[in-house]
Amino acid sequence: MGDFLNILTGDYEEIDEKYYYQIREPKEHKFSKIKNVLESIGINNVIECNSIQNNNENYYYFIYQLSDLRFLELSSFLISEFIELLKNNKNLNVVFFNEHESETEENYILLTQSILKQQLNPNQFYFINNNSNLGYYKIKNNGVNVHSLRFLPSYYSKHIFKTDIDIIKDKEFLFLCHNKRIKPHRYGILLEMKKLNILNNTDWSFLLNDDLNRDYYQFFKKLYSENEITSLLPYIEYFNKLGIKKSKYEYVQLNNNLENDFIYTKTFESAYVNIVTETYFEGNRIHITEKSFKPFNFYQLPIFLTTCGHVKKLKEIYGFDMFEDLIDHTYDNESDDKKRFSLVVREIEKLNASNIKDFYNKNIDRLIQNKKIIYDISNDNYDIEYFKKLKGNG
């Protein structure tokens, strides 16, 4: 067997275009897109195959980057010809692949159930995406094969986090809190910080508040009671009147171009603590994006507003120092979203009253060590080694 990955091409899916992020490309373009993504991860020697030609080699058919997996509720998501092909060729496999997003446990269960209903072998299916909790889904539900990608941190470490940054010991702000696409947990933390008068000591952004007429009782129902939402209405009005709010150095222009916040380092140099408002806050998926690596790359102390277990995974996988002698990250163990949100707010309030500057300047060596881990991540071969095993499983 050669050192290559056989990608079976063809249009074998009974899936409407509405399930895709974009209109489905012609099938002749599908291989080139998958090939490019795999190469960006470091998977080279990818071969396009129109049929199964060697029973001693594995073949993989990719269902790539779907917007959701509701189609799994259909009686079949594969055409009958391909189902027979799967049943007759145990070396043929189907890969649900998304290098940027993370899929839920619900979708994992739906996929496994759909496969079993069609009397297919779960061992011929792979669920590969950016959810670091996939191993838990596999153990709990005994379903299809899983792999939690580490593509995003590796990619950003190679291409984005190369920028040098100075360690500034006397900073302008205590906190930094960047928020682009508005979600309840992101909006909620800004409301709480406004209420506690902490925003004055924070370099913060609030960029895509695009619905001023939203039903806030519905919007915040998973974080607050109705009475709590009512009490927050004056603060909500403040943000609505404010409109778009960029952080301080997002206003700075160099060569007449607005610098991107994760490249323009001064915005990170100017705050001690980075309040990371990750993509997801509810549910049990762990979606680690470049947001979670910014405090470590830019010599900041971290606190995370995200799903339960996120901090634990960052420590287990990468070994980051979370400065637990200052920051109480036990909020990370709380599965109840409302309680976890309240614990994060309480920790921010505590930090606001602490001598952060003194702690920061006494622990520069630890900040530098976290930065070294970012450098190491750029050479992470975890995903490459996984796909090498797939090549060899004939």
Image: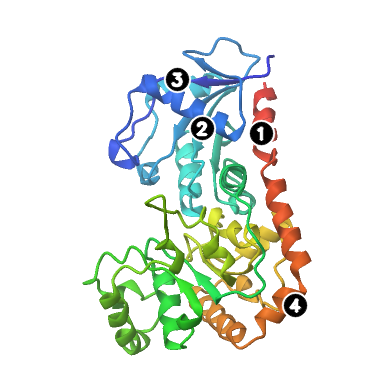
**Amino acid identity at mark 4:** Asp
Q: Residue under label 1, please give it.
A: 384
Q: Residue 242, how many percent across, how many down?
A: 29, 75
Placement of the N terminus among the 4 image quadrants: top right
Query: In the rendering, which numbered label is found on residue 9?
Result: 3
Do tag 3 and tag 1 residues touch (Cβ < 8 Å)? no
Q: Residue under label 4, please give it.
A: 325
- Secondary element at tag 1: helix
**Amino acid identity at mark 2:** Val
Q: Residues within 10 Å of mark 4 (few under 14, many from 20)?
A: few
- Secondary element at tag 2: helix
Asked if residue 4 is positioned above or below residue 220 in the image, the reply reads above
User: Which colour assignment does the render follow?
Assistant: rainbow
Q: Residue under label 2, please give it.
A: 37
User: Viewed as shown, does residue 158 lie left or right of 100?
Assistant: right
**Earlier residue among tags 4 and 1:** 4
Image depth: mark 4 or mark 3 in front = 4
Q: Is residue 199 visible?
A: yes
Foreground: 143 or 217? 217
From mark 2 to mark 4, how far is it between C-alphas?
40 Å
**Earlier residue among tags 3 and 1:** 3
User: Viewed as shown, does residue 42 lie left or right of 116?
Assistant: right
Q: Is residue 83 visible?
A: no
Do tag 2 and tag 4 residues touch (Cβ < 8 Å)? no
Q: Residues within 10 Å of mark 1 (few under 14, many from 20)?
A: some
Which residue extends farthest left?
213
Q: Residues within 10 Å of mark 3 (few under 14, many from 20)?
A: many
